[in-house]
Image (cartoon, helix red, strand yellow):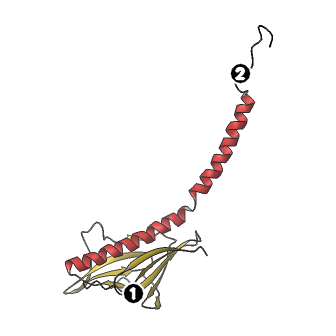
Amino acid sequence: MRVGQRAAAGFTLLEMLVVVAVIGIILSFAVLNLGGDRRAAELSAESRRFAELLRLASEQAVLRGEEWGVQIDLDEYRFLLYRDDGWALREGDDLFHPRTLAPDTELDLELEGRDLVLENSGEIKPTLLLLSSGEVSPFTAVFATNATEYRYRVQADLFGDIHWEALEPW
């Protein structure tokens, strides 16, 4: 190096722009891959909430010595309580209030080995029973939507064991 000449230190503006562009492209792919299937995550949460609420309602029925029911319609489900004059909607309860399913959620329900056709009938009657003895109506509910290939199953046996599981994509 000659006297009076300085060595070049650092990067040129072009080099910096290329590095920033490459990092941006890599981050874009990473965000897309990590973001995943948002509707599948929502459906998973919706089906897990259903399973956990049923589990908790079943425990409450046993602890309180009450007969509970769950009415499942096309687009919502609600918790019922059996009283001397028949089934009534649970009121004044923040946890067991009626829940509306996302508009594109398809719920296939099998009760005691038979497929049920869900409808919005308007009358109050239980689809599932959660008895004070700990027994639960044996059922299988599959949550699905056309927006994702993922599906989730909630199952209960007669003895009150309620299970949630993710199914293989179709």
Amino acid type of disc 2? Ala
Give me the residue at 28% from left, 76% from top.
59
Q: Quadrant of the C terminus?
A: bottom right
Q: Quadrant of the N terminus?
A: top right
Amino acid type of disc 1? Pro
Check disc 2: other Cα within 10 Å, few if <14, some if 14-19, many if 20+. Answer: few
> Toward the viewer: 133 or 118?
133
Q: CA distance from mark 2 to mark 1?
A: 74 Å
**Vertical order, 165 against 160 (above or below):** above
Is residue 55 visible in this depiction of the protein?
yes
Give me the residue at 70% from left, 37% from top.
19
Residue topped by disc 1? 138
Left or right of 17 in this view: 54: left
| Count of residue discs | 2
Is residue 126 visible in this depiction of the protein?
no
> In the figure, residue 34 lies in which quadrant?
bottom right
Left or right of 51 in this view: 130: left
Asked whether the residues under the numbered discs 2 and 1 touch, taking CB atoms below 8 Å apart as contact, a structural biologist would say no
Q: Residue furthest left?
A: 84
> Where residue 68 appears, x then y in whole percent?
28, 81
> In the figure, residue 91 lies in which quadrant?
bottom left
Q: Residue furthest front?
A: 1
Residue topped by disc 2? 9
> Where residue 85 appears, x then y in whole percent?
20, 87
Give me the residue at 20% from left, 81% from top.
65
> In the figure, residue 121 lies in which quadrant?
bottom left
> Where residue 70 appears, x then y in whole percent?
34, 80
| SS label for mark 1 | loop
Check disc 1: other Cα within 10 Å, few if <14, some if 14-19, many if 20+. Answer: some
Give me the residue at 42% from left, 77% from top.
163
